[in-house]
Image (cartoon, rainbow, N blue to C red):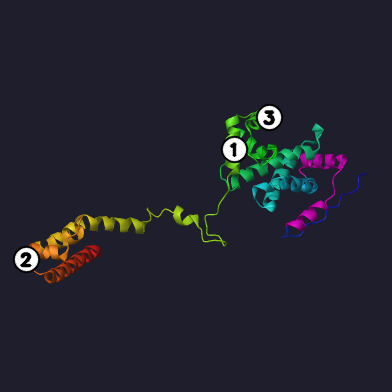
Amino acid sequence: MTQALTFPAISAVGNLDVYIQAAKRFPILTEEEEFRLAKCFREKNDLEAARRLVLSHLRLVISIARGYLGYGLPHADLIQEGNIGLMKAVKRFDPARGVRLVSFAIHWIKAEIHEYVLRNWRMVKLATTKAQRKLFFNLRGMKPTNEVLTPAQIEDISQKLGVKPEEVVEMETRLSGHDQSLEKSDEDGFSPIVYLEDRRNEPVHVLERRANDHLQGPGLQAALHALDDRSHRIVEARWLADEPATLQDLATEFGVSAERIRPIETRAMQKMRAHFEACGAA
């Protein structure tokens, strides 16, 4: 009679190292134990048998997840996704086929982790086709060095993975890119978000732009026409001409002193400002 298995309970842990140590304490099943538990779950839907199958393979998930740490994603999240794949494998495992669960589960564990990496890696939507996925998960390991691939190396990798050489070049270029935080870092004041942010379509800016367009177009013309002819001429010559006139130029034109032109200009500007404010309040 097979000795009953004892599985230590894992309490709620917030430390990854504690979880890993606890997972390693679960005993590895013999082939006979695994067959019995898998058969019991498959034929009787015994959830305790399924639980034991899962717990005994947690160390496998941890080992596989460790191989994906190079993508900058949390190890705990990778393990969690791998555990989902393990549970799917246990659900579909058929002990009658003569294959151990460890061999069957590897595919499901990696598949879940792959999907998680593709959904959450910082270079979003990097690998979408079958060829790109092959390259995404294999290119780094197949590169002999960190240097740029040579034409011969590109050709060799493309043949081994069954992809086009140009696809190898494209993926290498994309994997070689470095992510950069959009927010301001603690080390320096550089913040790309400042110049990447597009505020042109914000309601406030749209209204301001419309107001400015009106003031520089119909609004300006209406304000000028509200002036008498002399004031209109002075403002136009002083502020709207390609070569602004001097006070003396206008004094000569109107046959008065330069000191006389100044207050006329000031009153005209005040009147136009009042006109603009009235238009803005309307």
Q: Quadrant of the C terminus?
A: bottom left
Q: Which image quarter is the N terminus in?
A: top right
Residue 196 in the image: state x and y as whole percent: 46, 52
Q: Mark 1–mark 3 contact, CB under 8 Å?
A: no
Q: Is residue 65 left or right of residue 274?
A: right
Q: Which residue is mark 3?
A: 160
Magenta residue span = 16-45
Q: In the rendered view, tell whether residue 70 sits above or below residue 12.
A: above
Kind of residue at disc 1 = Met
Question: Is label 1 in a helix, a strand or a loop?
Answer: helix
The dot on residue 45 is none
Identify the amino acid type marked 2: Gly
**Of the residues under marks 1 and 3, which one precedes in the sequence?**
3
Residue in the image at 60% along x and 48% along y: 120
User: What residue is disc 1 on?
Assistant: 171
Residue holding disc 2: 255
Residue depicted at x 63% and y 32%: 154
Give x and y (percent) for residue 55.
Answer: 78, 49
Residue 129 seen: no
Q: Earlier in the sequence, mark 1 or mark 2?
A: 1
In this view, the residue farthest toward the right is 1
Q: Give the CA separation, mark 1 to mark 3.
A: 15 Å
Label 3 to label 2: alpha-carbon separation: 93 Å
Question: Quick one: label 3 or label 2, which is nearer the N terminus?
Answer: 3
| Secondary structure mostly taken by the magenta-highlighted segment of the chain | helix
